[in-house]
């Protein structure tokens, strides 16, 4: 079983979902979304995408803790970020 976290951001909110792949079958585990507050609306697209990823990991912390998972994002600048 592989767990995958997919996140995205728009001008006004962030969201995504956690799903698993077992024997080639996709199964959604849970969705999340959060509206951005006024100060966050001034962030760059990169900052919003990064916040969406952070918020997704925090939202599913209990499900992802001490487990390997795949993070899918659509913002190329974040693919080169390291921790």
Image (tube, helix red, strand yellow):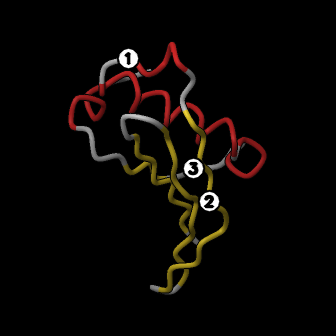
Counting every numbered tag in the picture gives: 3
Secondary element under disc 2, as helix, strand or loop, is strand
- In the visual, does 42 lie left or right of 37? left
Disc number for residue 43? 1
Q: Counting other residues with Cα less than 10 Å from the Cα at mark 1, is it few (<14), some (14-19), or many (20 or more)?
A: some
- 53 and 20: which is toward the camera: 53
Q: Quadrant of the C terminus?
A: top left
Tell me where residue 7 appears, x and y as whole percent: 45, 48
Q: CA distance from mark 2 to mark 1?
A: 23 Å
Q: CA distance from mark 3 to mark 1?
A: 30 Å
- 56 and 9: which is toward the camera: 9
- In the visual, does 50 lie left or right of 36? left
Disc number for residue 68? 3
- 63 and 9: which is toward the camera: 9
- 3 and 75: which is toward the camera: 75
Residue farthest to the left, as pictured: 76
Residue farthest to the front, as pictured: 38
Tell me where residue 29 appears, x and y as whole percent: 66, 68
The residue mark sitting in front, 2 or 1, is 1
Indicate whether 18 appears above or below 74.
Answer: below
Task: Name the residue: 51% across, 79% down.
Answer: 26
- In the visual, does 71 lie left or right of 28? left
The residue mark sitting in front, 3 or 2, is 2
Q: Counting other residues with Cα less than 10 Å from the Cα at mark 3, is it few (<14), some (14-19), or many (20 or more)?
A: few
- In the visual, does 36 lie left or right of 49? right
Q: Counting other residues with Cα less than 10 Å from the Cα at mark 2, is it few (<14), some (14-19), or many (20 or more)?
A: some
Secondary element under disc 1, as helix, strand or loop, is loop
Task: Name the residue: 62% across, 52% down.
Answer: 32
- Mark 2 and mark 1 lie on one chain; the one further toward the N terminus is 2
Asked if the residue under mark 1 is in contact with the one under mark 2, i.e. CB atoms within 8 Å, the reply is no
Residue underneath mark 2: 31
Task: Name the residue: 62% across, 59% down.
Answer: 31
């Amino acid at each position: 079983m592989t767990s995958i976290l997919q996140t995205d951001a728009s001008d006004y909110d962030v969201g995504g979902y956690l799903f698993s792949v077992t024997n080639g079958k996709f199964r959604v585990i849970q969705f999340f979304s959060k509206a951005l507050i006024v100060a966050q609306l001034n962030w760059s697209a990169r900052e919003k995408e990064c916040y969406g990823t952070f918020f997704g990991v925090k939202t599913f912390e209990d499900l992802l803790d001490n487990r390997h998972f795949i993070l899918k994002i659509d913002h190329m600048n974040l693919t080169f970020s390291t921790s």
